[in-house]
Every structure is written in C-alpha cells, then in structure tokens.
Amino acid sequence: MKITIVGAGNAGSACAFMAAEAGHEVSILKTSNKITHDSHFETMASNKGIYCIDNTTAGHFTNSEEDAKKSFQPLALITRDSKAAIEGADVVMIFIQTTYHEALAKKIAPYFQDNQLVMLIPGYAGSIFYRQHCPNNPIFAEGESTPNDARVVEPGTVKVLFKNVRNALSFFPASRSVKGMAIASRLFPAYNINKSSSRQHIFDSALHNPNIIVHTIGLYVMYPMLEYCAKHHPEEVPYMYRDALSTDMAWLMIEKLDAEKMAVLSALGCKAIPYLDACLFRNEQDLTQDPRAVFESYKMSSPPGPYSFDNRYITEDVPMGLVLLASLAEKLGIKVPECHRLIEMSGGILSRDFYQEGRTLTSLGLGELTKEQLLDFIEGTPPREKLIA
C-alpha cells in the first residue's frame, strides 16, 4: 500500500521505518517549520530515507545501541508539500500532538480522498475537525496508543524501544468500521486484530488512551521529585515510570481516575476496560498474565524523565484528554472529582487555564447535542450542513 506519515517525530519516524520495512511505499510529510525535529527531517530528506536501531529484536526493553545494528529503509517521498504527499495515498497516518489537530485539519483535510483511510494516533476525537474541512468521504480512524515506543536519537535515526502486540482502533463514522479494519489490518500486525477488539466509536478510543491516566498522574506525582532534583541534585533526573509510579499516592489516584473514566465509558454504552487490563492487551501475547506485574516489568526498564513539568504529558493530555473526559461526564451527569482536581492542579502549577484551552464537546461543535444525538453523530454520517455548522 501507499502510506503517508504526517509528522516526523518519534512515533511517525518509527512507523515510517516499520511500514517501509514491511514492504509498503512510504512518504513522510512534515507540516511544521522550525518547531521540532527540523534537522532530523532535513537529514532524512538528504539521505532519502531513515535509519533505525530496532531494539525489539533483542526481545526485551533496552536503551543500549549495542543490542541492535543500525539499518536503513528508503522512503518514496520526504516533503512539506501536503498535496503531493496525500493525494494517491491509500492510508494517511497522522502522528502529531493532538493540540494541533484543529489547525492542521484546515491545511491538509481538503486533500483527503474518498475511501482513503485517515488515521489519527492518538485521536482524542480530533477526526471531527478533519471531517469538517474535508470535501470528500474518507474513512477516519482513531488510535489510543502508538504502535511503538520510540525516540529520535540523532538526526536521521530513530530508535524503536518497544512494539505493541495489539492496537485497538475506532472509526468515524462507526458505520464504516468493517471497511476501515480491512485496510488497517494490512498495515502492521498490531492492527490485525478481531473486530470484537475494536472500540465502538471515537470517544471509546479517546477515553481508553492510556496517557489520560499514566501521563497526567505520573508527571503530577513526579513534580516534587523534579523540583527537589533541580535544587539539590541537578545532575540527576527522576524516572516517571520507575519512581513516581512506584508510590502509593500515584496508584490511589490511578484507581480513582480509572473508575471515573470507566463510569463515563459505561454511560456511553462502551466496554469499560481498566487501565492495567488495556495495557496488558496492547503489550503482551499471553493475556493470562497479571496486568500489574507486566506493568512493573515495563516500568523498571523505561527511559528517564520527563525533565520538566511543562511537558506534553501535561500540556497535551490534560487539556485534550482530561478536559474531554470532564466534558463528556458533564453531558452524562456523572461526577468526576479526581479528573477535575488534576485539571485544576496541573493548570495551577503552569498558570494556565486548561478548561479554556481544552477539547470539549462545545469546541468540537457538539455541545448542544443530547446524549442520543451525540451517539447518532459518531455512529453515522450526518448531513454536511449540520456537521459544518
């Protein structure tokens, strides 16, 4: 298939390499300029492809370059030209921070084509923005997690630390799920899962995004550790997974927020899967294992950081994830006090109003819909004049 990757960061670069390695014809589109990964993008363009250190071949988590040799995959096109990259592609995979979805939709959605699969990974219901600016009829898909854990380690080179075994998807409208799954299953083995394992709709995927819980709580609990190290041990940095997520405080907060998430999912008619069970499904072939034990195994070999509280773990996952959860809960009449505490405390630390910045049903243009109308909207294809209004 012809695949266009939008975004030249960690996940986009790794997926570009993986797709090319699997035999797909791959293009990379970078839509930002002088923000992040510019030297990496220019190096790929000069090399006409991408280098990768795939540490998953060692069969365990590692941050050592000695465990795998650097290999190269050529790419068909490395460009900033949206029209050239998107037209003619079978699949467009968008790997950008969800805070930029609304602005990016205006730039690239006019080039989407009928029956093209457009995947937002993650989505946080951002496909609604792209649909508003698209004159044609593609199939939109949203993921809750990237197919890999990766880092750009030097310009032109990405290191893959981990690959998910399974990745659930949802589709917008949900009525096109069967056709969408047929296309997605040909991308990577992680997407070749039973239809029963797909999410019901895009809000299902949004709330099962693990970052809503692990990023927001992990970095919130890590905040005093970052402050302490900065003042007393500037040469050291704590590890969010290893250190913050080893505390009783973190797991008490996780249990409370996870329960609120599942209450909203149940009210939306979705299967409410606990955070740890969803992690096990993504990461392990053997689903009989203890989910907490699997999480602990990953936690102890995760990379250090983040190095600052002013990080996308907060600045993306609080306004795009937690605020969306709070908005859905309000529509459904469900109380989510732990969610609100995290939004308010995180915003207070950074002196930002995440409620104002965040993704809500109103910002998506759905604020006036009843619960039934909301579900009808994401299940079917509404008249265009209603969708744009």
Image: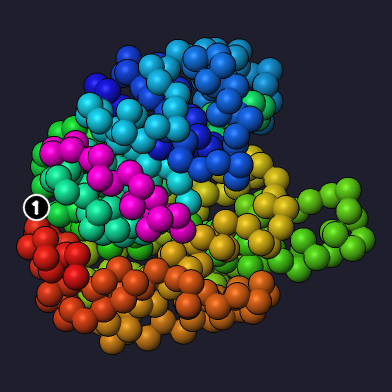
Q: Residue at x 21, y 81 (%)?
A: 368
Residue that badge 1 annotates: 175
For this view, does 78 lie left or right of residue 263?
right
Q: Residue at x 52, y 20 (%)?
A: 45
- In the foreground, 189 or 285: 189
Looking at the image, the residue that sits furthest to the right is 232
**Which secondary structure dominates the residues rendered in magenta?**
helix
**Residue 263 seen in the current view:** no
Q: How many marks?
A: 1
Q: Secondary structure at mark 1?
A: helix
**Residue 250 seen in the current view:** yes
Q: Which residues are magenta?
A: 98-116
Q: In the rendering, at what x and y percent does residue 337 appear?
A: 46, 84
- In the foreground, 365 or 34: 34
Q: In the rendering, at what x and y percent does residue 365 appear?
A: 26, 71
- In the foreground, 158 or 268: 158
Establish if 212 lies above or below 280. Answer: below
Q: Which of the 4 quarters of the picture holds residue 24? A: top left
